[in-house]
Image (cartoon, rainbow, N blue to C red):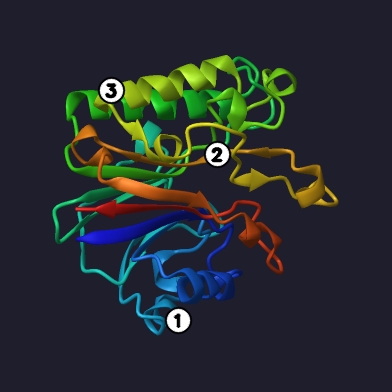
Amino acid sequence: MPFTLATWNINSVRLRADLVCKLLREEGPDVLCLQECKSPVDKIPAEVFAAQGYTHMVARGQKGYNGVAILSRLPLEDVGHRDFVGKGDARHVAARLENGVTIHNFYVPAGGDVADREVNEKFGHKLDFLTEMRDWFGEDRPEKAILVGDLNIAPREDDVWSHKQLLKVVSHTPIEVEHMAEVQEAANWVDVTRQDIPEGLLYSWWSYRARDWDAADKGRRLDHVWATPDISNAAHSSRVLREARGWEKPSDHAPVFATFDL
């Protein structure tokens, strides 16, 4: 069964429900994973998305912060979530499709502005979150699984506009990249996006601070689609919908897509 999946940090699902609907209408992914929903689950406009044919939703939410949701036009089974670092944050949710594929939707902490856990608690939180992800996947290695989300790390030199200038900037520091690599290695996750687009600069996030984000093009690839080795070869057609960053009142992230033939 072929299906297309997209991941998108929406930066408020209620504020940008119209953009979610635009994506669903124009691009038609079978599954859409959203992060930074900033809404309790009962306040997510599920009926608006159901009207577009996305009648299934699995979500974890909280007022004003974090929040993850999986919208689908395919039946989904809620298979729970984990509370990483014991903070009670809505940063993970998992669901299983009828074909047996489990989808993990993550919103990894951004980590603040200073890449030093001794002076920046948020950076320590981020590193600890990644360590717990590594340990979990190492102890209970997933099979037939897809991991998506805003992981808030651009790991490769061509995942940022300037490797040299961003080496000390949170999201591209060596310690973050190392922690991310350990998460990948714990379950042999395959970076599907880079499997399909192995070369060249590739971004999914552009700062609101840039007057003309498109011309400046100082982006980072913070949003990811991974798959376990048993299904990674079934993935193809990865792409970033860059144009969505230019929609009216946009998120600062663009959706990332991948198709799987299973």
User: Contact, CB < 8 Å: mark 2 with mark 3?
Assistant: no
Q: Secondary structure at mark 2?
A: loop
The answer to whether residue 156 is above or below residue 252 is above
The answer to whether residue 11 is above or below residue 194 is below
The dot on residue 48 is 1
Figure quadrant of residue 180: top left
Q: Which comes sooner in the sequence, label 2 or label 3? A: 3
Task: Tell me the residue that label 2 is attached to.
Answer: 222
The dot on residue 186 is 3
Q: Which comes sooner in the sequence, label 1 or label 3? A: 1
Residue drawn at x 64%, y 27% as measured from the top left: 170
Cα–Cα gap, marks 2 and 1 = 28 Å
Q: Secondary structure at mark 3?
A: helix
Q: Tell me the amino acid under the disc marked 1.
A: Val
Mark 2 surroundings: few (<14), some (14-19) or many (≥20) residues within 10 A: many
Question: Where is residue 256 shown, x and y percent of the image?
Answer: 49, 51
Q: Is residue 221 visible?
A: yes
Q: Residue furthest right?
A: 211
Q: Tell me the amino acid under the disc marked 2.
A: Leu
The answer to whether residue 52 is above or below residue 170 is below
Q: Residue furthest bottom?
A: 51
